[in-house]
Amino acid sequence: MESIFIALGGNALLRNSDKRTYESQLKRAEEAFRHLNGIIQDNLAVVSHGNGPQVGDILIQNEMSRERTPSMPLFACGSMSQGVIGDILLSAYDSVRLKGTNMKDPAYVITRTLVDVMDPAFQNPTKYIGPFYQREMAEELASKSGWAIKEQDGKGWRRVVPSPEPIRIIERDVIRHLLDAGVLPICTGGGGTPVAEINGKLSGVEAVIDKDLASSVLATSLSFQRFMILTDVPNVFVNYGKTGQKAVRHVTLDSLKEMYAEKQFPAGSMGPKVKAAIRFLESGGQTVNITSLENCGNAIEEGSGTVVTRH
């Protein structure tokens, strides 16, 4: 039995062709747990997940109803998404797990992640969130709400927020107690709700935390052996989309760091996942698997996908 931290990618709940309904996400979550059930039952496991599309929808709902009800701050929207996704994941897990006395009970933990208000990211917001606007409307909202805005790929203007480094998962000890009790914790949704120490207390801050980096922080603090990053491709690639594209299969930490330094992994896709893998191994983890959800069983049993080891 191993300790395995499983970071689910966005495709575990929504794919590009899906309608963004509760029912559609529940169906995808059931598919995810059918792939994961054996790993979860046979090992000490924690599951984390993304929340980008769900938070985006909540922000649109905020915008559409702003004349009737007060809009919630971004960090509260993140917590709201954790609640909704938690309900979906718990329902999906219960519908899939094998019946029997030895099956683990699940528990969803709404998770907060500590960040530093002095993080340079707060001076340079880069993470796009929410809907697209025409420039005039975006500037009006920015003036009224104190937003930072930027144009994205010629498609329109969007709000941008900081993406600071995660320092610590506030609910780590709660998650440890659940593991000790034989429970499956599902947590760190969307990287967790960002909080900072302000005037002697923890307060929510307007930011978005990368969920793979936050998952790496939690996996390290729990002294887990293996970190599984599940995405929509079976392997990490170098020269992706270019001549000489090649799948990375078995690689050492030092070799992966060299590839990362060569900017082989785009910041908007594989970059944060590779960065999270590097940090996990540098902090004492033993193995990282980066692969597709459908391939997760083979990744454990046969070493398929991308496998990263310390040496």
Image: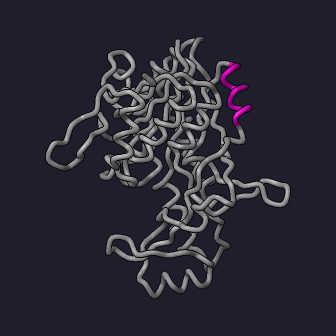
Q: Position of residue 49 (x, y in %)?
A: 51, 41
Q: Position of residue 84 (x, y in %)?
A: 57, 48
Which quadrant would the C terminus be assigned to in this image?
A: top left
Task: Please tell me which residue is depicted at 33% across the width and 70% down the height of the picture.
Answer: 153
Q: Is residue 24 visible?
A: no
Count the numbered circles shown: 0
Nearest to the observer: residue 100 or residue 5:
5
Q: Is residue 93 above or below residue 238?
A: above
Q: Which stretch appears magenta? A: 172-181
Q: Which quadrant holds residue 156?
A: bottom left
Nearest to the observer: residue 65 or residue 14:
14
Q: Is 91 a magenta residue? A: no
Q: Is residue 94 visible?
A: yes
Q: Is 175 a magenta residue? A: yes
Task: Please tell me which residue is depicted at 72% across the width and 42% down the height of the picture.
Answer: 170
Task: Please tell me which residue is depicted at 44% across the width and 46% down the height of the picture.
Answer: 272
Q: Which quadrant holds residue 254?
A: top left
Q: Farthest residue in the left direction?
A: 243
Q: Is residue 228 above or below residue 20?
A: above
Nearest to the observer: residue 215 or residue 56:
215
Q: Is residue 304 left or right of residue 43?
A: left
Q: Position of residue 3 (x, y in %)?
A: 55, 20
Q: Is residue 247 above or below residue 104?
A: below
Q: Is residue 120 left or right of residue 98?
A: right
Q: Main secondary structure of the magenta part?
A: helix
Q: Farthest residue in the right direction?
A: 200
